[in-house]
Image (cartoon, rainbow, N blue to C red):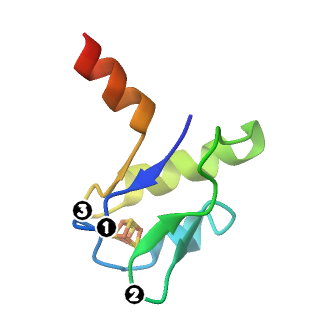
């Protein structure tokens, strides 16, 4: 699993950072970004998934899933 934040959608609520502080941080511009851009390690996948599902505006996505959907 990988994660990315769409900065045009993120409202900077900080929920992802609260749920998965090792994976996301809200930057100086008030927008969340993924600290980990490579494959998320197994021990953080659950937190990352919770954050992704908990984002109120669905700004968090898995870039590899998108590629698979495009290829399908
Ligand atoms: S939970 Fe979603 S909207 Fe809130 S800071 Fe994280 S990415 Fe942005």
SS label for mark 1: loop
Q: Look at the image and tell me in which quarter the N terminus lies.
A: top right
Residue at image mark 3: 57
Q: Which structural element holds mark 3? A: loop
Is the residue at mark 3 in contact range of ligand 1, meaning its CB lies under 8 Å from it?
Answer: yes
Q: Name the residue tied to disc 2.
A: 29
Tell me if label 2 and label 3 are in contact, CB under 8 Å: no
Q: Residues within 10 Å of mark 2 (few under 14, many from 20)?
A: few
Q: Residue furthest bottom?
A: 28
Q: Position of residue 11 (x, y in %)?
A: 28, 77
Please tell me in which quarter of the rendered image ligand 1 is found.
bottom left
Which one is in front in this view, the residue at disc 2 or the one at disc 3? 2
Residue at image x 36%, y 79%?
12
**Relative side of 46 to 14, left or right:** right
Of labels 1 and 3, earlier in sequence is 1
Q: Is residue 42 above or below residue 33?
A: above
Label 2 close to label 1 by CB (< 8 Å): yes
Q: Quadrant of the C terminus?
A: top left
Please tell me how crowded label 3 is: few (under 14), some (14-19), or many (20+) other residues with Cα within 10 Å. Answer: few
The alpha-carbon separation of the residues under discs 2 and 1 comes to 10 Å
| Residue at x 23%, y 65% (from the top left corner) | 9
């Amino acid at each position: 699993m990988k994660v990315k934040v769409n900065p045009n959608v993120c409202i900077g609520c900080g929920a992802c950072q609260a749920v998965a502080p090792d994976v996301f941080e809200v930057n100086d511009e008030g927008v969340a970004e993924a600290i980990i851009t490579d494959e998320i390690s197994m021990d953080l996948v659950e937190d990352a998934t919770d954050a992704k599902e908990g984002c109120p505006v669905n700004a968090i996505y898995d870039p590899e899933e998108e590629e698979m959907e495009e290829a399908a």
